[in-house]
Amino acid sequence: MNRWKIGVALGLTLGVALTVGVILHVGAAELWAAVRRVGFDGFAVFTLYSLAGFLPLGWAWWVVAPGAGSRRWLLFPWGRLLRDSAADVLPFAQIGGLLVGLRAVQVRGVPERLAVASQLVDVTMEMAAQLFYTLFGLAMLLAVLRHATGAQELVWATAAAIGAGALGLAAFVALQGRGVDLVGALGSRWIKDTRERAAAIRAELAAIYARPARLAAGLAWHSAGWMLSGAGAWLALAFMGVHVAVWKVLALESLVAAVKSMAFLTPGALGFQEGAYALIAPLFGVSPEAAVAVSLLRRAKDLVIGVPAMLAWQAGELAERPKAAAGEAP
């Protein structure tokens, strides 16, 4: 536990230092001017747009959860909202967000085996969709830099990141079942029925992977989610008065997302996101200060959405405790 706390503290310290360094590099005054141009109304629209983006992300999880029920079409977006909010607002990194998302759907009646198995598949489909999204960004980067000097290093670095992502995805798929079994075996030392629960999850996992139509639907929803998220950056830039072709902003966002995924151990990819925006944005005709302003707007939006979501989740947990206690009473 102490090592985990030390790791979180070091990650946050590094992230804050990187963020401050990027702000000083691009110029705090210029950055603040870019943010101010968005205004309260622009930020409100940007936040509402981002909030609506949880619908396709939640539906991507919902469609790979057979038997979840047609009436739960809003439950899984809520679970996805809490998953991202916990990762963005709390010092959990990604793993804590996944656990919060699981809890959110389980407390509303989704069986454990289905919740865990479907989330594993959902994460897999999201990784696959991001891989295609990054390939798009690489193709656009090649188109932009085909005549630039010194562009080969950046292209090769991006290609290497895509290759690493593909290997990681393949390993994640191949080891999912074994990972569930390992958790069941380890947990059986303290909890009696852990092996049986792990076996049920693995059976559910196999059943989901046997339905290619659902997998394709999940992949499609996640692809839509990535594109809509990228379009949100274009919207923020438009509010700043920066007019750039949509495809350039989508390409920029895909490459920034790839950097963020490699910094998954740092809460919110703090600092890495800002650095990626500052370095990559000029290649697509966006000034560093405007790009970093988008990054800060994203973080402000995460707080505006995430903090109330976490408070609502905690309120719901407190409301469920008396019900659970009544159910356990003889």
Image (spheres, grey):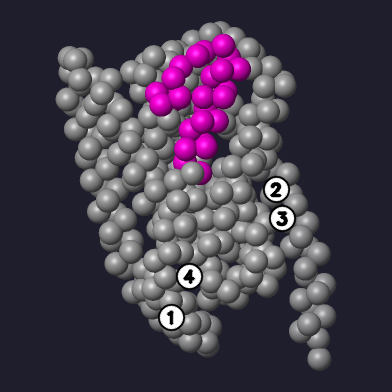
Query: Which residue does the numbered mark 2 point to in the structure image?
Result: 309
Q: CA distance from mark 4 to mark 1?
A: 9 Å
Position of residue 69 measured from the top left corner of the image (x, y, whole percent): 64, 70
Helix, strand or loop at label 3? It is helix
Question: What residue is rendered at 81% in x and 64% in y?
Answer: 319
Q: Earlier in the sequence, mark 3 or mark 4?
A: 4
Q: Mark 2 touching mark 3, by CB under 8 A?
A: yes
Residue type at numbered disc 1: Ala
State yes or no: discs 1 and 2 in contact (Cβ < 8 Å): no
Dot 1 or dot 2: first in sequence order is 1
Horizontal relation, residue 130 to residue 119: left or right? left
Residue at disc 4, secondary structure:
helix
Give the magenta range: 225-249
C-alpha separation, residue under disc 2 versus residue under disc 3: 6 Å
Observer-nearest residue: 252 or 15?
252
> Label 2 is placed on what type of residue?
Ala
Pair 1/2: label in front: 1
Give the label on residue 313, or none. Answer: 3
Residue 243 among those drawn in magenta: yes
Residue pointed to by mark 1: 203
The type of residue carrying mark 3 is: Trp
